Amino acid sequence: MGRVAPAQVRRITCVGAGVIGGGWVAYFLAHGYAVTAWDPGPDAESRLRHLVEAAWPALSEIGLADGASPDNLAVAPDLASAVDGTDFVQESAPEDLDLKIRLLGDIDAVTAPEIVVSSSTSGYGMSEMQVACAHPERTVVAHPFNPPYLIPLVEVVGGKATDPEVVEWTSEFFEHAGKAVITMDREVPGFVANRLQEALWREALHMVAHGEATVEQIDRAITEGPGLRWASQGPMLTFHLAGGQGGMTHMLDHFGPSLLSPWTRLDAPELTPRLRSDVVAGCEAEAQGRSIDDLVAERDHSLIAILRALGRA
């Protein structure tokens, strides 16, 4: 039997039912899938059903798929029965590499070889985790963000032994399931969003440690400032617009020397001609033909909507 098309997935197995695994269960249920969960922990079923019940009002508010119901959740007594007849497996065990290796090997051993096995890991690469699998070609990372039932982003990336078609299938599945997908070109420690969060987190800790800012000042600096802009256009397009009509080209040429200023404790990369060209070209590609004026109008419209939603305008 071959692998079903991404849009034909009907039954999903979630292995691990903690905060992330339970969040996945709630998300998949809300999108009309039948979900079978397995977690060896004590009281796992009661904790999982409580999490789904707590998440359901928010999911109902943003809209449920036809037929979506918590009643479509089954909790299996063992791993083999959990994956029996499944179309897709999402693993969300704790972040322990040895545990991940053993568990993925166990899942691989009892799951039909055509079924994609995806991990929610937030730090390990699939190349590290797939080493005990007899069919590592069908293992892939789909890294979500908490809570998975509300935050759209999922980062998809394979390991050294992963079939590229599996990466493509997984990205298509999550897009069909309503997620905003970044299909990564290669494995990067910490993935994309975590790397960016970590840089901000480390600088924030440095500022507190040196008495340069309080916790409240740091949080307000983001929620009342760049965080509002990032919600609609992200840091790269934000700097693209900071260059005025000259866009990122002017931004890099004008502010590039400040990369060497001691503003952060992070080492700045050298602004080589290639890096400059890649960043400029990336902004032009993301703009998709929209002018600076177009992007400014879109940004302002989004900022007004965000401020109104937060009760600040």
Image (cartoon, rainbow, N blue to C red):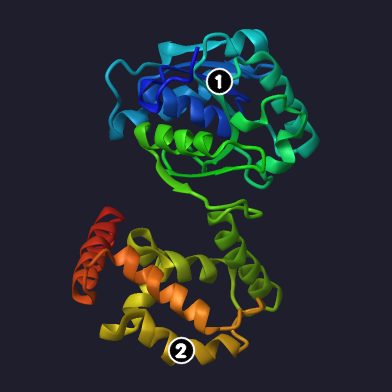
Q: Is mark 2 on a helix, strand or loop?
A: helix
Disc 1 marks which residue?
A: 114
Residues 81 and 26: in front is: 81
Label tally: 2
CA gap between label 2 and label 1 equals 51 Å
**In the visual, does 290 lie left or right of 95?**
left
**In the visual, does 155 lie left or right of 137?**
left
Residue type pointed to by label 2: Phe
Q: Which of marks 2 and 1 is nearer the N terminus?
A: 1
**Proximity of marks 2 and 1: CB atoms separated by less than 8 Å:** no
Q: Is mark 1 on a helix, strand or loop?
A: loop
Residue type pointed to by label 1: Glu
Residue at the spot 28% in from the left edge and 58% down from the top edge: 306
Q: Residues within 10 Å of mark 1 (few under 14, many from 20)?
A: some
Residue at the spot 22% in from the left edge and 68% down from the top edge: 290
State the quadrant of the C terminus: bottom left
Q: Where is residue 208 in the image (x, y as percent from the top left)?
A: 66, 72
Residue at the spot 28% in from the left edge and 30% down from the top edge: 63
Disc 2 marks which residue?
A: 255
- The mark found on residue 298 in the picture is none
Seen in the picture, residue 4 relative to 308 is either above or below; the reply is: above
Q: Position of residue 251 (x, y in %)?
A: 39, 85
Q: Is residue 225 visible?
A: no
Q: How crowded is mark 2: few (under 14 residues within 10 Å), some or many (20 or more)?
A: few
